[in-house]
Image (spheres, helix red, strand yellow):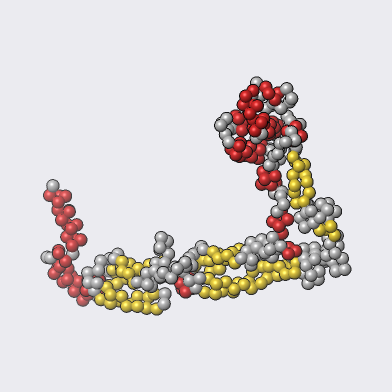
Amino acid sequence: MSKDLYQILGVPKSASDDDIKKAYRKLAMKYHPDRNPDNKEAEEKFKEVQNAYAILSDAQKRATYDQFGNAAFENNGAGAGGGFGGFGGFGGSQSFDFGDIFSQMFGGGGSARQQNFQGADLQYSVEISLEEAATGIRKQITVPTYDECDVCHGSGAKPGSSATTCSTCHGTGTVHVRQAIFQIQQTCPTCHGTGKEIKDPCTKCHGEGRVATTKTVEVNIPAGIDNGQRIRLSGEGEPGMRGAPAGDLYIHVSVKPHKVFHRDPEAPTDLHCELPISFPTAALGGEVEVPTLDGKVKLSVPTGTQNGKRLRIKGKGMKSVRSSLVGDLYCHVVVETPVNLTERQKELLQEFENLTSTDRSQTPKQKGFLDKLKEMFDN
């Protein structure tokens, strides 16, 4: 019993022409013989998909199939399991859009010449400091490139000779190759898509018309750039061959870790740092000196500042790379416990402890903790 053509393509009977075409493209690429060499099952599937599409993509044939089923085509060899004898069996009025399918599969198509000879994109990594990222900087970098050959002046042919029309493709830059039952357009293997054949190549550039060299490029790294971001310089990549456009140059920026500051991943314009202060400064308050990316500033520490408190210095962060916005600097207070105390210092601290132990209102967190312990054990 012949298979249902809609089931072969995996679409319902109500499928639109576009749905049928998409299903065919997907299955044709999946079962194509070039992708499944020596696979008889895939070959049969491929034929089934071809035949199903040949009928369901034609409005008149589809209407006939919907009314009479496979029987309407079996007498002339057009059943779902049979073959149409190549493209000719589909009928003169049938038009198929195979080019766009197989240009994706095999790289054929009219744009192959430009794609083959456009210059490659280049990648370059540059490392900068956080200070340089904050202010922006111009850097000169040296990248590999090509120059026109000074012997053949870009022609690729030895002086006194010239390129001739390619004998394989006759100047078109493409050839037609049979793949199973299809005829595929591919880039000419002789001239590589140029349409010209150099029989006597230049001894310096070996027929390429260009020679390897380096060039210096100035890169403007904007203020506020973050680690991992990249800059694109259009047309500064590898030059194309024989007049084709150049590729692009991508500068990957790496910002070195800073000894004091780090950026907030969620708010990259803000900077953060630790601010160690003494116990007396935390208790009594005072003014401390804080470093920033553009110098030192005075910061007021409130009386009774607790460990971990965050103090903000407005406008001392990073500039936004996309606007004039400038972030803030956040100082995270670390109250430092003194070490290596002298006997006199120990005496004074013990005296202080004796004075405060009778009035826990001065240490509210400690008081709250002791109150919770009391409730636990009283119950």
Residue shown at 40% from the left, 70% from the top: 326
Query: In the drawing, does residue 236 fall left or right of residue 203?
Result: left
Instruction: Give percent across and percent down for residue 154.
Output: 78, 67
Instruction: Give percent across and percent down for residue 237.
Output: 64, 65
Task: Check the image and report above or below for 82 versus 321.
Answer: above
Task: Check the image and report above or below for 119 versus 316.
Answer: above
Q: Is residue 287 visible?
A: yes
Query: In the drawing, does residue 258 fall left or right of residue 195?
Result: left
Q: Is residue 343 visible?
A: no
Query: In the drawing, does residue 178 fall left or right of residue 104?
Result: right
Image quadrant where residue 341 sits:
bottom left
Residue shown at 75% from the left, 64% from the top: 242
Given residues 352 and 361, the one toward you in this image is 361
Instruction: Give percent across and percent down for residue 332.
Output: 33, 67
Query: In the drawing, does residue 333 fall left or right of residue 199?
Result: left
Given residues 112 and 231, the one toward you in this image is 112
Residue shown at 54% from the left, 74% from the top: 138
Given residues 9 and 127, the one toward you in this image is 9
Q: How many marks?
A: 0
Quadrant where the N terminus sits is top right
